[in-house]
Amino acid sequence: MATKERVFKALKENKGKAVSGESLARSLDISRTAVWKAIKSLRNEGYPIEAGTNKGYILAAHLDYLSEDSIIAGLDEDLSDFSIHLYETLESTNKTAKEMAFKDVDYNIAVIADHQTRGRGRLGRDFFSPKGSGLYISLLLKPSFDMSKSVLITTAAAVAAVRAIKKFSDGDLKIKWVNDIYMDDKKICGILTEAVTDFETGQIQHIVLGFGINCFEAEYPEDLSQKASFIGGNFSRNKLAADIINETMKIFKNIESRKFLEEYKNLSMVIDKEIDVYKPAACASRTAVPIKALALGIDSDGGLIIRHEEDPYKGHIETLNSGEISIRVKKT
């Protein structure tokens, strides 16, 4: 364990209490200079560590720290075999989960981080992942079918996320097809589904389901501040992480029944709305001309059924299984 991580662990064990630099150096068998450098590095990463003359270092007691034991305690009894891998910082929880899969680890694993340096969304976009305010969790699962059902998997995950978040908020939760959760018209959660394939057989070996959830207030970049929000309130991210796992597994155990799709439809913020559709080739460029359409419904595999509203395909019915959409409120 790196010096910085050891210092942080010691402060976390004494959160809210002052710990002297001398005491840290002695208990960790490092120099006072090494302690000071670790504290400086932790502060630069955003951790609120106070220091006062003759008081020592104090890590704020009110912060919601992620805890492997607390997450495990919140899991349903039939998930006692679920393996939790908790990190202070990762490049990406999905990336780490996929690396585990390539090492032939068992499935039913959750990779959770307090912070991501290169959080990822759909279509290669970045996902803003600040310290201490979000929950970044990726589940490594065994698929019951191939990736032709990838949209169905993502819709299932979206319903699971809403069920979990509802336990901590009375906000108006809606799903924007296919993978975004909105509360009171602002995005609070994104979901990224990826597959791990056996190169020799071409079979899907694992599914990685990544959830990025904005839990508490944070300083968002300017381009996100008008469209992103957070759950808010007073709750534990550990309990939310456990509930994300619980609700996801409840659906996945019987995903082929598709019973959750009715719930997905009722939560949709898209159905009966005029939308702009960007096909996959156009998603990388916001200058591309979108398809004007009306969202009609959700099919049995989670695809979005649309009707083209402009020539040359006006009136044509199509089902989308990839790409992205933006919503235009219908004029009345």
Image (cartoon, grey):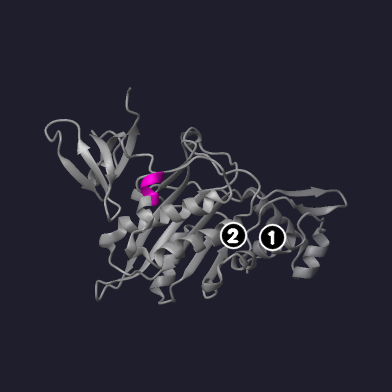
* One can see residue 180 in this view: yes
Magenta stretch, residue numbers = 263-267
**Few, some or many residues within 10 Å of mark 2 (<14, 14–19, 20+):** some
**Few, some or many residues within 10 Å of mark 1 (<14, 14–19, 20+):** many
The amino acid at mark 1 is Phe
Look at the image and say whether residue 266 sits in the magenta stretch. yes
In the rendered image, the vertical position of residue 327 relative to residue 177, given as above or below: above
Residue assigned mark 1: 8
Q: In which quarter of the image is residue 98?
A: bottom left
The amino acid at mark 2 is Glu
Look at the image and say whether residue 25 sits in the magenta stretch. no
Query: Is label 1 in contact with label 2 (beta carbons under 8 Å)?
Result: yes
Q: What distance separates the C-alpha of mark 1 from that of mark 2?
A: 10 Å
Q: In which quarter of the image is residue 6?
A: bottom right
Residue assigned mark 2: 88
Q: Where is residue 308 in the image (x, y as percent from the top left)?
A: 19, 36
Q: In terms of depth relative to the viewer, which is nearer, 175 or 98? A: 175
Labels 1 and 2: the sequence-earlier one:
1
**Where is the C terminus found, in terms of image quarters?**
top left
In the rendered image, the vertical position of residue 222 relative to residue 43, given as above or below: above
Q: In terms of depth relative to the viewer, which is nearer, 232 or 46? A: 232
Q: Which residue is drawn at 33% across and 36% down?
A: 326
Q: Where is residue 12 in the image (x, y as percent from the top left)?
A: 72, 60
